[in-house]
Image: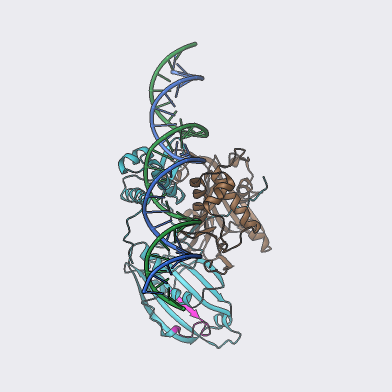
Chain colours: A brown, B cyan, C green, D blue
Amino acid sequence: MDDLRPEKLYEQVKTYLRTGIAAGTWKAGEKIPSEFELMDKLGASRMTVHRALRELSAEGVLLRVQGAGSFVQPPAPRSPLLEIHDIAEDITRRGHVHRAQVLALDSRPAGAEIAVEFSPRPRAKLFYSEILHFENEIPVQLEERYVSPAFAPDYLAQDFTAITPNRYLQSIEPPHEVEHIIHAGQPDARIQKLLQLAAHEPCLCLLRRTWAKAGPATRSLLTHPGSRYSLGSRYKLADFNARPG
Amino acid sequence: MDDLRPEKLYEQVKTYLRTGIAAGTWKAGEKIPSEFELMDKLGASRMTVHRALRELSAEGVLLRVQGAGSFVQPPAPRSPLLEIHDIAEDITRRGHVHRAQVLALDSRPAGAEIAVEFSPRPRAKLFYSEILHFENEIPVQLEERYVSPAFAPDYLAQDFTAITPNRYLQSIEPPHEVEHIIHAGQPDARIQKLLQLAAHEPCLCLLRRTWAKAGPATRSLLTHPGSRYSLGSRYKLADFNARPG
DNA sequence: GGATGCGTATTGTATATACAACTTTTCCCT
DNA sequence: AGGGAAAAGTTGTATATACAATACGCATCC
């Protein structure tokens, strides 16, 4: 699965700087070598070095000041608001019993709005799984998931009563990018029955989309009973340092 | 406040494409003109067009496929839930009009469960504000907030129709620690009326607690109409592969 | 001493060119 | 028809060059 092709030159420059920063060669607030020095040192053209530095700047690794130089930024306060956690792990950590019931597992053409998220070709087929999760035999999550066949070719062969899709997909390749959208909704009759919801009981819907480096990987709609479930996070914010002087 | 300098050329190209996409000239999944066509049309060099397209791709506006073309990506709703965002900023950034109505602003003894979060003395008084936020005159958030008097002694003297409590509190001292808990709920009759909710319409509740270095600072319960509002976040995960080559 | 101006270092933008990598279409041969 | 090779079209990377814009130190002038 490893990419054996040589790293692009501008990626090499980025890697060189990132590892140098990680190793402490240049510390937060310090100035790194100028574009011209890096040209000589790494044997790349200025435009290539420039592109690498511009991207590192966009990523928040560097702060570039025209006329002055490029400075190492303090690490960004990365907030794992909704990390990709595994519901089975959550439940067993609470000391409860988890059970998964597979309601569907197949390959199907998704609706146009969903298919276009995965490919510019609108009629592409996607893997689909629908799983109901129980905590102590009480339903707590309905998981409707589309998966890109290119990302997980063996998806349909898995036993999702033994390993959650989440865990399986993470084992293939951790996502490169994640999106979460949360809203409160009124479930339709089918979901109401599956989650054993009381009349007019709202549900908490979490849409999670992930991207691998190669492109869109998964799209999951996780529906929880509103009265029995909440999502949470708590984290410390890193201190901000001012500009280098 | 406006920047009167002429837009950079690559920014002009980006703006041209963004407005075209917004206007429906190219719809999600469709192919936009090639780099060469845009060169001729806009009178920029290929490298400049290329940079604009590359950045739009990084921003998630386009999907570029080598050898095939550039395709419009479906819009990704990204409102950073990770950060402490200001609802007034969010609304104005969407180009809409924000208005805040102060329903309450006083000092009161909070209920025992809440007061004990701030102080070991259960009858301690806390500052309390209740503000209803409108987007284009439609209510989108009820903000019920307790603030530690020790953290913000002048809280009651502020004009919260002009500056949101969020923004004011951030100006005192950015929080050291943050907690978010999200759940879907059924509003009581009062909230239902304030948010102009339909019968049985659920609401999305975000409880946010912050701590300063000295101790607990604020506790806010933000209630949104479920049908008209969602919370979202999207972020890239850092690469930690500094593997020796 | 302080303000001004100038030169140098550094980053920002824009162009032209070349070739590589990949996709789609065309067309020819069987 | 079908298969496969060739061609055309499109994006990706890399370089060399030129000039613009900004920051900063240093010398000069008052």
Q: Is residue B33 above or below residue D8?
A: below
Question: What residue appears at the point 55 percent right and 42 percent down from the top-left corner?
Answer: A8
Q: Is residue A100 above or below residue B194?
A: above
Tell me where residue B113 sits by quadrant. Answer: bottom right
Between residue D30 and residue A154, name the one nearer to us. Answer: D30
B148 falls in the magenta region: yes
Percent across and percent down for residue A150 are: 54, 39
Tell me where residue A135 sits by quadrant. Answer: bottom right
Question: What residue appears at the point 61 percent right and 59 percent down from the top-left corner?
Answer: A26
Q: Is residue B158 above or below residue A62?
A: below
Quadrant of the rendering where the N terminus of chain A is positioned: top right
Q: Is residue A194 visible?
A: yes
Question: What residue appears at the point 42 percent right and 46 percent down from the top-left corner?
Answer: B51
Between residue A33 and residue B126, name the one nearer to us. Answer: A33
Percent across and percent down for residue D17 are: 43, 43
Percent across and percent down for residue B221 are: 48, 73
Between residue C7 and residue D6, name the one nearer to us. Answer: C7
Question: How many discs mark residues in the rendered view?
Answer: 0
B84 falls in the magenta region: no
Percent across and percent down for residue B106 are: 44, 86
Q: Is residue B141 left or right of residue B151?
A: left
Magenta stretch, residue numbers: B143-155
